[in-house]
Image (tube, rainbow, N blue to C red):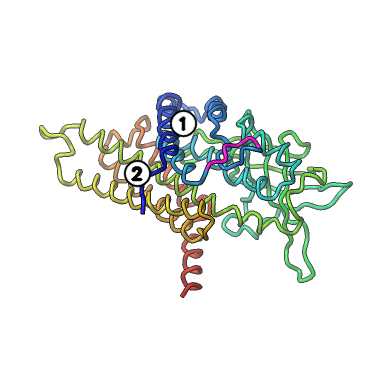
């Protein structure tokens, strides 16, 4: 067993850490306060070859492995969760359906700009009445005039309304089969398509610098070559790329715990009470010990899931476990870290308050933790 990251992965992580320290950390609080999506940061990430890490080089990506992707996420998310979560959505659920199921022409037309970083991608699944129940979506696509007519609403969609948004990959109902079961298909809708509109940026508890909107499709016509993969296979396609997305969200949680630990140690050693640094008090020291221990446990769950994916081995259960545990560790770490900071931590201008607000969504997004427990339990029972 070798727990060391490969040398090239460590070098990549060091590079991203330096980039984040210069380009993200000094500005993150202002972006959050202004609810500003920092387009130049994503352009620079593209210049570094990081906007298509999981995409092969032939389509403009870096062709990196999943372990390296997690290592990069550790650094981006420790600097700012809004930037990292936008990068996550772009890199996984927005890009991977095109990679896995798109035609060569679709990959060159839409995937390559996403992978190069000249554009950012969005994925539309969640609706006002359908979240965890992905099969319950109501957006419909009907054949019309040599293409498809879309009608419906998507909710809480990331990256759809930015200056560099190229379009949205979405799931829609196309009809019913002979057994009266819904049929689904995946479509690509470019930004600016008539009938496709983005609502105003939604006001969220956290992730303030991430673009999140409602998307409305009202008699939105797209040509037949905007269908991704086979009609009738859309839901299966989505579920097949979800496991990689779970690893990514698990890595996002890991990065938040990493930030919480660093901020806790810094404050506890610099802040003095009763003539001693806070770190000299056992109650504070034990909190730091708990954050550090859970962070290390989460780290190896996340990296193991990534390693299994890179080995071509089944990793769905490991990904669900990593997402479940890392997201809950992130929330506990943020809460304990804020307690260590005391009143200073409760002020909005403190870094830990931003991470604290960002933590909760990790237990909700990419499949709620209740859904993760269902996935894990089914797998364990099946193995018995």
Quadrant in which residue 270 is drawn: top left
The magenta segment: 59-64
Observer able to see residue 37: no
The percent coordinates of residue 187 (x first, y second) are: 73, 47
| Residue at screen point 27% across, 36% down | 343
Say whether disc 1 or disc 2 marks the residue closer to the N-terminus.
1
Q: Which residue is mark 2?
A: 334
| Residue at screen point 75% across, 53% down | 140
281 left or right of 43? Answer: left
Instruction: Say what secondary structure mark 2 lies in.
Output: helix
Q: Quadrant of the N terminus?
A: bottom left
74 left or right of 268? Answer: right
The mark total stands at: 2
Observer able to see residue 11: yes
Report how far apart the C-alphas of labels 1 and 2 lie in the structure: 17 Å
Instruction: Say what secondary structure mark 1 lies in.
Output: helix
| Residue at screen point 74% across, 59% down | 232
Q: Which residue is mark 1?
A: 32
- Residue 60 among magenta residues: yes
Quadrant in which residue 264 is drawn: top left
Dominant SS in magenta:
loop
282 left or right of 247? Answer: left
| Residue at screen point 72% across, 43% down | 188
The percent coordinates of residue 103 (x first, y second) are: 74, 46
Quick one: 122 or 384, which is closer to the camera? 384
Q: Is residue 64 above or below residue 143?
A: above
């Amino acid at each position: 067993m070798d727990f060391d990251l490969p040398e090239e992965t460590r070098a990549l992580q060091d590079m991203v850490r330096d980039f984040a320290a210069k380009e993200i950390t000094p500005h993150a609080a202002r972006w959050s306060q202004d609810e500003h999506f920092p387009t130049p940061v994503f352009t620079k990430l593209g210049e570094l070859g990081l906007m298509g890490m999981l995409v092969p080089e032939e389509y403009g990506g870096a062709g990196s492995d999943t372990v390296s992707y997690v290592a990069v996420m550790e650094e981006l998310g420790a600097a700012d969760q809004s930037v990292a979560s936008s990068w996550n959505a772009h890199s996984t659920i927005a890009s991977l359906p095109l990679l896995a199921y798109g035609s060569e022409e679709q990959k060159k037309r839409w995937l390559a700009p996403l992978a190069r970083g000249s554009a950012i991608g969005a994925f539309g699944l969640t609706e006002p009445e359908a979240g965890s129940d992905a099969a319950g979506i109501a957006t419909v696509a009907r054949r019309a005039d040599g293409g498809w007519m879309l009608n419906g609403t998507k909710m809480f969609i990331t990256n759809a309304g930015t200056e560099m948004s190229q379009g949205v990959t979405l799931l829609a109902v196309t009809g019913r089969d002979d057994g009266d079961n819904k049929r689904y298909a995946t479509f690509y809708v470019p930004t600016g398509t008539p009938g496709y509109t983005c609502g105003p940026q939604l006001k969220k508890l956290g992730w303030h610098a991430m673009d999140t909107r409602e998307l409305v499709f009202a008699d939105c016509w797209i040509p037949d070559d905007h269908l991704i993969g086979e009609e009738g296979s859309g839901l299966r396609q989505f579920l097949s790329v979800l496991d990689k997305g779970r690893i990514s969200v698990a890595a996002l949680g890991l990065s938040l715990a990493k930030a919480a630990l660093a901020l806790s140690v810094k404050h506890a050693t610099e802040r003095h009470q009763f003539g001693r640094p806070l770190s000299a008090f056992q109650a504070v020291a034990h909190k730091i010990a708990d954050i550090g221990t859970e962070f290390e446990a989460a780290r190896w769950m996340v990296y193991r899931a990534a390693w299994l994916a890179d080995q071509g081995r089944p990793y769905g259960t490991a990904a669900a476990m990593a997402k479940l545990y890392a997201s809950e560790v992130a929330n506990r770490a943020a809460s304990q870290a804020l307690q260590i900071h005391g009143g200073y931590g409760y002020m909005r201008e403190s870094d830990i308050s931003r991470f604290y607000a960002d933590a909760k969504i990790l237990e909700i997004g990419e499949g709620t933790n209740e859904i993760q427990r269902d996935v894990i339990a089914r797998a364990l029972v099946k193995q018995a």
